[in-house]
Amino acid sequence: MKGSVIILCFFALGAILGVYDLLPLEHVPVDNVSEYVLMSLLFVVGIGVGADSSSWDLIKSMNYKILMVPILIAIGSIIGAALVSFALPNISFADGAAVGSGLGYYSLSSILITKANGEMLGTIALLSNIIRELTTLILVPFYVRYFGRFAGIASGGATSMDTTLPIITKYSGKEIAVISVFNGIVLTLLVPVLVYFSLSILPIIVKLSTDLFG
């Protein structure tokens, strides 16, 4: 939780500096910086997943049915966020789906969305995914008690393999840890794909559906 609060504080500091024009942004190539950060994040994610041989061994050893856990979490996250867009006049269905596609991975998803759709949606994605992680850290006991042992994993999303893993294991049981790690790995890999799908392909599907049935 400490790490999430630190990230949130840095974001708030950046927002304050931007609002009060305290930085010489006219001399900073913001677009290039965000692109370099994005490439660096993707590179680090690739190293982390590729170098962790135990993760690959885990995937090979588990029954294919375990794939249903991250798949259903991804579908639920995207559909839930997309439906919320109907209550927000400036957010389209595809935009809502893109925010949900972050799956709790706020750093990577917010940069991807900012690059593709602008700072406003990227900021929404950042805040919503940080809030997802923070609420998981705080409310896992409640989730597990009333919604079952997999509820903490569903809430944590991509963070279920690292930052929220200890709290999930504590309240769901040590045997759930393996599934939690597997879920986090799969969702982390899916984030770039789902964000791209939501912002590039989903709008086309929505438009075609509207033309055919609207």
Image: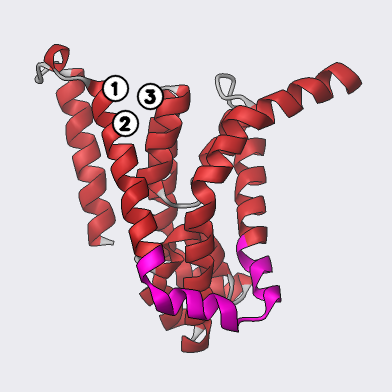
Residue underneath mark 3:
119
Instruction: Point out the image quarter for the C terminus.
Output: top right
Could you say where residue 172 lies in the image, as x and y percent from the top left? Answer: 51, 81
Image position of 64 (left or right of 58): right
Comparing labels 3 and 1, the label whose residue is closer to the camera: 1
Does the image show residue 131?
A: yes
Q: Is residue 118 above or below residue 51?
A: above
Give the structural element (helix, strand or loop) at label 2: helix
Residue drawn at (49%, 74%) of the image: 56
Q: CA distance from mark 2 to mark 1?
A: 6 Å
Give the structural element (helix, strand or loop) at label 3: helix
Crowding at label 3, few (<14), some or many (≥20) Cα neighbours within 10 Å?
some
Give amino acid for label 3: Glu
Comparing labels 2 and 3, the label whose residue is closer to the camera: 2
Residue drawn at (32%, 47%) of the image: 41
Q: Earlier in the sequence, mark 3 or mark 1?
A: 1
Does the image show residue 101?
A: no
> Magenta stretch?
50-70
Could you say where residue 14 lies in the image, as x and y percent from the top left? Answer: 19, 31
| Most common secondary structure along the magenta stretch | helix
Instruction: Point out the image quarter for the N terminus.
Output: bottom left
Residue drawn at (62%, 70%) of the image: 147
- Mark 2 touching mark 1, by CB under 8 A? yes
Crowding at label 1, few (<14), some or many (≥20) Cα neighbours within 10 Å?
few
Residue underneath mark 2:
35
Residue underneath mark 1:
31
